[in-house]
Amino acid sequence: MFGHFMLNFGFWLQMPIMPYYLEQEFTTNKATIGFVISCYTISALCMRAFSGFLLDTFSRKPLFLIAFTVFASVFSGYYFAASLTVFCIFRAIHGLSFGLGAVSSNTIVIDIMPSSRRGEGIGYYGLANNLAMALGPLTGLYFSGTSLSYRGVFVCGFVCAMLGIIISSFVKTKPKPKIQNRQPLSFDRFLLLKGIPAGIALLLLSIPYGITTNYVVKYAEESGLQCNSQIFFILMAVGMAFSRVFSGRLVDKGYVTQAIFSGMILVIGCYLMLGSCNAANNINPIFGTTLFVTSAILKGIGFGILFPAYNYLFVALAPNNRRGTATSTYLTSWDVGLGIGICLGGIIAQKTGSYAPAYICGAFTCLVSAIYFKLRVSPHFVKNRLDNK
């Protein structure tokens, strides 16, 4: 957990400062910024299509260490990139290495977790990731305002990621059993077909998440909110930590689909509030600020419930020898929506002059996801789940 936190913390340090860095260093517009940032997600998506197959075929720990060593090294590439093209190349390499590393890390955790406490274990493991996603941007924004500057944030990211690799190298994993009868290559070896319905619902949820993580600071500035925009990440982290205390245990007790649906309702409310902050602030600044901070808490609680439950759902749909593929499908679904959200957020802001419409669109995609999950995904899961040990 600690090693995984440091790896992700190093990455999320530079996420909120990336739009500012690209704008100042390379003089790019909002749409171009969205494209450059999304290069990471697109390449991670391409790698995750093969990650599950690699992890189900070869030893998982060596793949994990190799992937994250490359991942850490790319931070130095950001530091020295002299052109937007070179920066895009490093962004793509970052995505490729993280695509394999994240799937291998997640799969290793499931391997070493006792089945009776798998939901709780995934919850605590996910908390390390979610806290990094919340505290990393906050710290990155703080560092960028000091003498470290934007390039100093890249150096900090490199140091944190290397510490994460060193710590994670001490994790003891069981030897991978030899495969007696190798199955022929097929599409199902790269993508868990039974997980596609759940993947569609998750994709729709991750679209507004991508918009929030990369643009919420700019949105707070353009809305003229009378609060430090960094408070959003603090409150989101608090909400996630609070929900992790009970969400994993609910999953272990069998309330998988119920937990996911309740998290979806909270997330819908979050994005409706967030998209209304601009208009609310014009009416009453206190009202606008209240909506902003409340949306952060709801986002933290909602996704804090969703992440471990969704992870468990995908693993429960796959046999033990397909855990890598199940995890890959889960994370691929998330990455597709995240990439769409990053690009879509920049395009909508460019066309409308504000990020507010992007968050309203995000609330709509979450509503569609909730309806689809209730009518299609939940019955499918109940029918096809496996009792894996």
Image: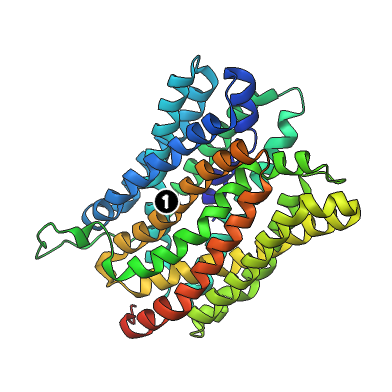
Residue reaching furthest to the front: 352
Q: Amino acid at mark 1?
A: Val
Q: Position of residue 49 (x, y in %)?
A: 29, 50
Q: Position of residue 51 (x, y in %)?
A: 30, 50
Question: Residue 387 lies in what quarter of the image?
Answer: bottom left
Q: Residue at x 67, y 36 (%)?
A: 140
Please determine whether, in this image, residue 244 is positioned above or below residue 7. Answer: below
Question: Residue 389 lies in what quarter of the image?
Answer: bottom left
Left or right: 152 as drawn, with respect to 225: left
Residue that badge 1 annotates: 336
Please determine whether, in this image, residue 240 is positioned above or below residue 387. Answer: above
Count of marks overlaid on the render: 1
How has the structure been colored for display? rainbow
Q: Residue at x 27, y 67 (%)?
A: 193
How many other residues sit within 10 Å of disc 1, few (<14), some (14-19) or many (≥20)? many
Question: Residue 221 lies in what quarter of the image?
Answer: top right
Residue 95 appears in the picture as rendered: yes
Residue 2 appears in the picture as rendered: no
Residue reaching furthest to the top: 82
Please determine whether, in this image, residue 152 is positioned above or below residue 222. Answer: above
Q: What SS does tag 1 mark? A: helix
Left or right: 166 as drawn, with respect to 175: right
Left or right: 65 as drawn, with respect to 246: left
Q: Position of residue 178 (x, y in %)?
A: 17, 61
Q: Residue at x 59, y 76 (%)?
A: 262
Which quadrant is home to the N terminus? Answer: bottom right
Q: Position of residue 143 (x, y in %)?
A: 72, 32
Compare residues 65 and 285 and report the one nearer the observer.
285
Q: Residue at x 52, y 38 (%)?
A: 161
